[in-house]
Image (tube, rainbow, N blue to C red):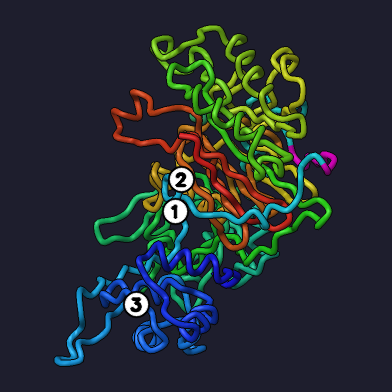
Amino acid sequence: MAAESWTEKSRALAAAGLVVMGRDAQTKIEELTNLAPLIEAANASNTRLLTSQSIDELLSIVPTEENLTEAEPATQSNSQTLQATLARPETGQAIGRTIAPIATNEPSPAPRPHGLDHYRMQDFPMQASDVDSEIEIHFDITGSSRTEGKMTDIKSFFGDRLKQIRNQLISGGALPRRPVSIAEAWRNRQRHTSKDYEVTLVGLASDTRWSRAGNLNFVLEDETQNLSCTLKPPSGASPLHPSLDGLMDDEVVGISGHFYEKRFSASDIHLPPMRQHSKATAGEDRAVSAAFLSDVHVGSKTFLAPQWEKMIQWFNSDPLAQTVKYFVLSGDGVDGVGIYPGQERHLAITDLFAQYGELARLLEGLPDWVDVVILPGNHDAVRPAEPQPALDPEVQQDYSDAVFVGNPCEFSLHGVRVLSYHGKSIDDFVAGLRSVTYSKPEMAMRAMLERRHLAPSWGGKTPLSPEPEDRMVIQQTPDIFVTGHVHGHYVGNHKGTTIVHSSTWQDQTDYQRMLGFQPKPCILTVINLHTHESASIPFA
Ligand SMILES: [Fe+2]
Ligand SMILES: [Fe+2]
């Protein structure tokens, strides 16, 4: 209104039924930058004639930009809430009706579907098409599996695990004293019979169970012998302390304590130290993003095709999508064939190669600037024993722009180290640790990082390949740790590492319905490799 001419103002006043009387009145109106409060006050006071005097009276009872203090600057909301009328001279009461104040609406962002966090585009600063691809593979078993599955292989597999994690315990300063072998401690058990003469051991835990008194009983085994142990929960222990949370079968731990008859009474338990991790970042001139998804399950009747179309449209139109340089699929790209009894009933595509052909067709819809990284999972057509090699070259030939790697795989994107693992062992973690449930797969991921092992348990639900070197050991803390498999969704942080549990593209299955499990499908997780900010985009 500030720039309104007298003609416009007189027209507005006439439209409001007001008549301006005299040159002085016109001058006062010309000086006003906003007529609305004057018109409101005149209407409310049943005033029709605007004289110099009535204008002064009306303006004295309404806030205008001129009479508002600096401490309370004029806003549309407070000029609306402070409406009033002139007073009746004889009674002092307001003339006419008092206009009800209008509630102030504080602008706030609309809630996002699924309650997902908001993201800011300035955290995703670079167009993917401006940057060349830079994927460096650090570990992938493909072509280098060296086991015949013999007893000697199994022995060297566990021997290597023990050696790797024992070294992490010692070099990380996690142990109070130099560890000795179980055989040596046993030989000298008469010397270690009280708290004053404790000894430290390192071995693989198994046969874990809680006693009626709430103590954790387990067997510790190293290269020399087995030992029955008891761990009493320390007073005030967190629910995540192994004495309360549990131990995974075959995980490597250190324990300190003394002998009590033929058992070892552990006063303390030691895991490899996990200190705050300082993430590597891609350079400012490489500030592109990576998107994470798994468990597409193409070929299943519950694959969510319309939502996939929606995502492809998003990829080809949304500003955030233009920053996505890498698209990581962490296993179970197809539903597979013969994975579980009666699977045929749930398949829309019953031929395995046709399933992979359809996945290739679906990925064709992604823009040219996106590089796809594909890992296998337990539904894929590779050996189930982990580490799993990449998909067969015969399958790969259908895909034009994809990098096929094994499961798990460690790779860097512009210097940012990613550990991607399909996550089959989450089934074992749910069975082994009290803190882990299917609705909280991130707790299993946290436990994997803390234990430095992706799948410790032999003979559980995760088939393992007894390689001479145990490459399921987490040798280096990743910047981004990603899993899938249980069809949830999570993005968070554990001691500096970004944890991503990738979403699925499969609707609730009959089996999940029977278990009462509700998946979180069709959420694409995007992480910028320079800012490390994340965005979760729902398509369902
Ligand atoms: Fe899956
Ligand atoms: Fe899976």
Q: Secondary structure at mark 2?
A: helix
User: Magenta segment range?
Assistant: 130-139
Provide the residue designation for mark 2: 441
* Residue nearest the observer in this picture, 179 or 399: 399
**Callout 2 amino acid:** Pro
Provide the residue designation for mark 1: 110
**Callout 3 amino acid:** Leu
In space, the residues marked 1 and 2 are separated at their CA atoms by: 28 Å
Vertical order, 430 against 334 (above or below): below
Instruction: Say which mark, if any, is on residue 49.
Output: 3
- Residue 379's x, y, as percent? 53, 22
Asked whether mark 1 lies closer than 8 Å to ligand 1, one says: no
The residue lying at 27 percent from left, 84 percent from top is: 86
- Residue 42's x, y, as percent? 33, 76
Q: For residue 43, what is the image quadrant? A: bottom left
The residue lying at 47 percent from left, 17 percent from top is: 300
Horizontally, residue 409 falls left or right of residue 540, namely right
Comes first in the chain, label 3 or label 1: 3
In space, the residues marked 3 and 2 are separated at their CA atoms by: 74 Å
Asked whether mark 3 lies closer than 8 Å to ligand 1, one says: no
Residue furthest to the left: 91
**Badge 1: residue crowd in 10 Å (few <14, some 14–19, many ≥20):** few
Q: Secondary structure at mark 3?
A: strand
Q: Quadrant of the N terminus?
A: bottom right
Comes first in the chain, label 3 or label 2: 3
The residue lying at 45 percent from left, 70 percent from top is: 76
In this rendering, the label closer to the viewer, 1 or 2 = 1
